[in-house]
Amino acid sequence: MLFGGFDIVVIVLVIFVILVLFAGIKTVPQGYRYTIERFGRYTRTLEPGLNLITPFIERVGAKLNVMEQVLNVPTQEVITKDNASVSADAVSFYQVLNAAQAAYQVSNLENAILNLTMTNIRSVMGSMDLDELLSNRDAINDRLLRVVDEAVHPWGIKVTRVEIKDIQPPRDLVDAMARQMKAEREKRAQVLEAEGSRNAQILRAEGAKQSAILQAEGQREAAFRNAEARERLAEAEAKATKMVSEAIAAGDIQAINYFVAQKYTEALTSIGSAPNSKIVMMPMEASSILSSLGGIGAIAREVFGDAGSSPSTPLPVPPRPRPAPARSTPPINPSTPNPFNPEQER
């Protein structure tokens, strides 16, 4: 089949139109931005999806990834404020916010961000002591993020995070720090042990003090009670003596007999209940107690005369005691005078 000149022209035009259409249709994937240049000048930015451009007049200038990206910062030597050499590496996260600025404000974007982050790491970490550097990583990250983000802002870049991954001091410095930490912990343990011993001694002293105070208070209370008991006993004795004296003054001979007999009986009870006595030598027979009462009554009649008793009221005669059973105690010598028996005296 032969084509004429017109047919060839038509075929060429169709092919040209198809090529123009393919050249003017641009598909932008999600997460990317394309810059469009017209005769080498930036005109606009293509969004994700299907876009049309003017073929042969406009072209795609730069294809930029606007997703958040990770940039590894290599290990570098840093001299701290106290002249300690440490090795540090980091990681940086950034995102393109303005594709035109990122494409036309800076050349080699990743290299620029990397060098900017490295220099700021040396600047920030070099202004801190080693101890502060090892213990304040959050502060270092915040300062780095603020400084780097401010520096890359004209490039249409947002630095979302800067993290220090590792800080490695020299080996001898690590050993010195380990010895220092051990010494600090031993010191803290000794301080805590000393404080515990001190508190224990204080508590024991407080306990002894409270015990002594309570014991002294108990002794004082006991002495007070004993004194009060003696006072009550003395008051009772005084009252009894007063009553006996009043009875004697009134001529009651029986009160004299009762009072003398009570005291004599108490004296004999004390002699018999002594803990160091094994054998008690009685200086008189049991009947001498009653005869002594009678002698005292006779003396009282001679002293008081008829004032103690009326002729019509005879004095009571105490009953004669029963004869005591035979005892192994040697009998009392009858020739021995009885001071309480007036008959023997006469």
Image: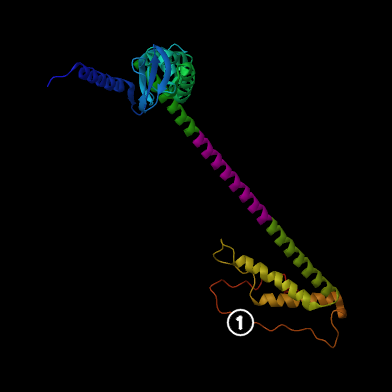
Residue pictured at 40% horizontal, 20% vertical: 177
Residue 58 versus residue 312 in the image, above or below:
above
Residue 46 spot, x, y in % from top left? 39, 23
Residue 258 spot, x, y in % from top left? 74, 75
Q: Please identify the quarter of the rendering in which residue 111 is found.
A: top left
Count neighbours of disc 1 (C-alpha within 10 A) and say few if under 14, some if 14 to 19, many if 20 or more.
few
Quadrant assignment for the N terminus: top left
Outermost residue toward the left? 1
Residue 140 versus residue 251 in the image, above or below:
above
Q: Is residue 196 left or right of residue 266?
A: left
Nearest the viewer among 330 and 168 is: 168
Q: Is residue 312 left or right of residue 72?
A: right
Residue 35 spot, x, y in % from top left? 39, 19
Q: Is residue 217 magenta?
A: yes
> What residue would you read off at disc 1?
323
Q: Is residue 263 magenta?
A: no
Nearest the viewer among 191 and 23 is: 23
From which residue to which does the magenta span run?
195-223
Residue pictured at 59% horizontal, 73% vertical: 331
Q: Main secondary structure of the magenta part?
A: helix
Residue pictured at 67% horizontal, 55% vertical: 221
